[in-house]
Amino acid sequence: TQSNITFEGVGIEYRIIAEDPANRFSPWVGRIDNFSWQKEAWLSLHTHVPTHEPYEIPTEFDPNLALGIVWGKDLAEVKKRGEQFLDTLVLDGANQNGEPLKSNVAFLREKTAQILRF
């Protein structure tokens, strides 16, 4: 029954996107050469991007790369874990001009530090 449902802990959802936050979050097109993350019990990461071979970001679709869900017992713990996830996430690549991959990872890291409450 509804009374059997309990809530425990706090979660943060991170949408990892190939975009340029400094340029109105415009989509970034290019190749991902290296994509990896630390596997943790408190992290669930969903992605279509291969981790063992280069990946060309298609221009026909949204540049969403991954969805990371981080869980903690309270806000302080989930923020710390979220920052750890973003700090250890590896996302490297370049566009056809050799310019490095742009993503929203640094933006998400900055905003995680600013979360005060849910």
Image (tube, rainbow, N blue to C red):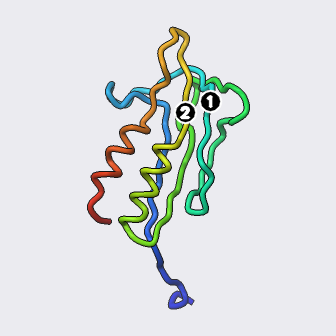
Say which of 24 and 55 sits in front.
55
Q: Residue furthest right?
A: 52
At horizontal 63% and vertical 44% (from top left) the residue drawn is 47
* Quadrant of image for the C terminus: bottom left
Residue 52 lies left or right of residue 79; in this view the side is right
Vertical comparison of 14 with 43: above or below: above
At horizontal 53% and vertical 84% (from top left) the residue drawn is 5
User: x, y percentage for residue 79?
Assistant: 39, 58
At horizontal 29% and vertical 65% (from top left) the residue drawn is 117
Whether label 2 touches label 1, CB < 8 Å: yes
Cα separation, mark 2 vs mark 1, equals 6 Å
Mark 2: which secondary structure?
Answer: strand
**Residue matched to label 2:** 91
Q: Residues within 10 Å of mark 1 (few under 14, many from 20)?
A: some
At horizontal 51% and vertical 8% (from top left) the residue drawn is 97
Vertical comparison of 15 with 20: above or below: below
**Residue matched to label 1:** 34
Number of numbered discs present? 2
Say which of 104 and 75 sits in front.
75
